[in-house]
Image (tube, helix red, strand yellow):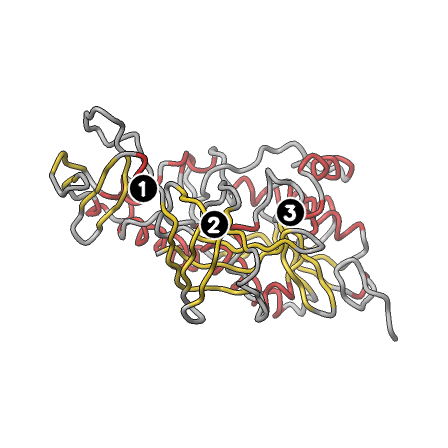
Amino acid sequence: MNYELNSLGLKKKPSDTTVVVAMSGGVDSSTVAGIMKKEGYNVIGITLKLYDDSKEVAVSKQCCSGQDIMDAKRVADKLDIKHKILYFQNKFKKGVIDNFIDSYLKGETPIPCVQCNQTVKFKDLFDVSKDLKADAMITGHYVKSVTSNGVTNMYKAIDDNRDQSYFLFSTTREQLNYLRFPLGGILKDETRKIANELGLNVADKPDSQDICFVPNGDYVSVIQKFRPDSYKKGNIKDLNGKIIGVHDGIINFTIGQRKGIKISNKEALYVLKIDSKKNEIIVGPREKLGQKKIFLNKLNLLSDEIDFNSDIFVKVRSTGKLLDAKITLSNKNCAEVNLKSPEDGISPGQACVFYKKDEIGLKVLGGGWII
């Protein structure tokens, strides 16, 4: 029997459609689970246990803590949906935490949330969802997904303050066709309103702000815990190669940083380069921070038909603005990005995400890692 497309773009009645909802215990994913249940879908909520949180971590503003798992369970009971907890601590340690630490030790500024989506959430949870014979996997991310003729494209969310498309650039085409993001077309205030209407206990729960395994934003303490030998003193040099100070470890610095250099100078000094091989920090004036050329590797393109000769915008940090750019692919895995205007604080380890405007909105084309 032929059915009309349901709200997920699938030719099945909601009651015949099984969906897995990734439930972190926050208001966003809980609301998504409630929406799916209300629309008549067969909902399976899955919560991931990603790390062994201490009491110190559990009370901070983080996702995926022990309290969050309890909250997710309460929401599932309230909605009368199936709920599973998956223990992915080892996968998370190898795929996210180890990568995070290695990146800092190489003088980069990593984005663990992208690594988490790229590995544990959109790979391992994707596989689990397939094993459960689910028709789609649903998350509470603020991005728009538009499905047409069986192909799903990703767009920037309408809520500028909540848009998470930057963090999802590494989603594969196969994953994107399977994923759905119901919150991309509404504002955060509307999400909380829906949660209240559904009677969910997390309706007024504060948003997580910290990286889940980094208590109170203190990433240096995490690196020290796992790699206590990472604190190695080294030289701080100016642009002429003159030694003007000593640092306690390159993990304390990121490109564009001003505070913490602890060198008196007539004009403010900024971190311009981190040389992990020489264990050196290069500093200089702010006007030397600006860059127009960026090199990328490990590209992930969400379409085979991207016209890079047309107007392309890029983001080089999650909170950054859209920048006009010209992109040249050197091969399928590498690209050169030329910005029309210099941008400060571009750091290896961050992502450069590609966008293009069309009749629907701001479409995510993919991106790569800044090297």
Position in image of residue 110 (x %, y %) = 38, 49
The amino acid beneath tag 1 is Thr
Q: Is residue 199 left or right of residue 294?
A: right
> In the image, is residue 54 above or below residue 39?
above
Separation of residues labelled 2 and 3 (CA atoms): 18 Å
Observer-nearest of 193 and 201: 193
Q: For mark 3, what is the residue?
A: 157
Q: Quadrant of residue 290?
A: top left
The quadrant of the rendering that contains the N terminus is: bottom right
Could you tell me if the residues under marks 2 and 3 are in contact, i.e. CB atoms within 8 Å?
no
Position in image of residue 367 (x %, y %) = 49, 58
Q: Residue 139: in sight, yes or no?
A: no
Q: Secondary structure at mark 2?
A: helix
Which residue appears at 42% of the width and 71% of the height?
331
In primary-sequence order, the first of circles 2 and 3 is 2
Between disc 1 and disc 2, the foreground one is 1
Q: For mark 1, what is the residue?
A: 254
Which residue appears at 61% of the width and 53% of the height?
22
Q: Secondary structure at mark 3?
A: loop
Q: Residues within 10 Å of mark 1 (few under 14, many from 20)?
A: many
Which residue appears at 42% of the width and 54% of the height?
338
In primary-sequence order, the first of circles 3 and 1 is 3
Could you tell me if the residues under marks 1 and 2 are in contact, i.e. CB atoms within 8 Å?
no
Q: Residue furthest bottom?
A: 1
Q: Which circle marks residue 113 in the picture? A: 2
Q: Residues within 10 Å of mark 3 (few under 14, many from 20)?
A: many
